[in-house]
Image: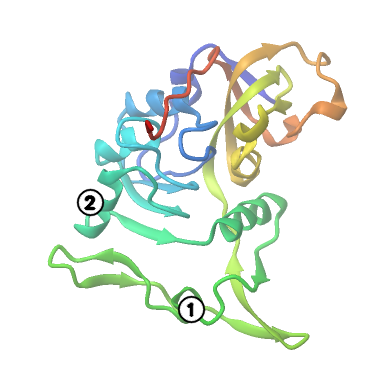
Amino acid sequence: MTTVFATAAEAVVDIGSGASLAVGGFGVCGIPDALIHALAAGNAADLEIFSNNCGTDAHGLGILLAQKRIRRVTASYVGENAEFARQYLAGELEVELTPQGTLAEKLRAGGTGIPAFFTAAGVGTPLSEGGLPWRYHPDGSVAVASPRKEVRTFAGRRFVLEESITADYALVHALVGDTAGNLVFNKAARNFNPLAAMAGKVCIAQVENLVPAGTLDPAQVHLPGVFVDRIVHTGPQTKPIERRTVS
């Protein structure tokens, strides 16, 4: 059953050092910012993160990164976070870059109990053949490289085996949630949130609007409460502009 928490700090209090986290969001859209701030106010360090990217230098997961609280990141791109790139190239952060669709399926598969799957994405590249730098030495040489993955042929096409992702915790953001944990996401802010929620052994959701169980139309629910363990009402979210441009 889903437990309603009064504050984000109470919801994340047991996340300790060394924990792995699946975190929803895309850029700064739909990120669980209140939960991240609460985590940053604690002492948890040496974290392993599974997320599409690592926020910006001053927002989202970038806050934990700037505090040197993250040990390893599995993501699709560096994005707008210069500190992410600096730590990676300096050998301070281990990074596994993976195709965006593959990352989405790895999270979904983990949440549904599928241990691995074959995909055509990355076949014939260092992604499948190995050798991608996961961590550098401070002198720029490769400290840890990706391993070779199994490749098999089906119906004349080659596919690479990708293992699914499960995490100790999932942190997600939703527009509406009810006290039974059912979630509704707002348009593009849905992004990786349902997938991250499924992959976490303990899912913690921050919601802008909290309503009583039974209020939501079941046909409108994007993620059923069976995947959500904790929920906290954080109020309306103000999304910053990730990159401001003028003409």
Quadrant holding the C terminus: top left
Residue 189 appears left or right of 76: right
Q: Is residue 108 above or below residue 169?
A: below
* Picture residue at 53% right of the left edge, 82% below the top: 124
The furthest residue to the front: 247
User: Can you give x and y, in whole percent of width and height, for residue 158 in the image?
Assistant: 65, 83
Q: Amino acid at mark 2?
A: Arg
* Picture residue at 35% right of the left edge, 37% below the top: 56
* Whether label 1 touches label 2, CB < 8 Å: no
Q: Nearer the viewer, residue 244 or 7?
A: 244
The answer to which quarter of the image holds residue 152 is: bottom right
Q: Amino acid at mark 1?
A: Thr
Q: How many marks?
A: 2
Residue 125's mark? 1
The furthest residue to the left: 139
User: Can you give x and y, in whole percent of width and height, for residue 47 in the image?
Assistant: 37, 44
User: Can you give x and y, in whole percent of width and height, for residue 5 in the image?
Assistant: 56, 16
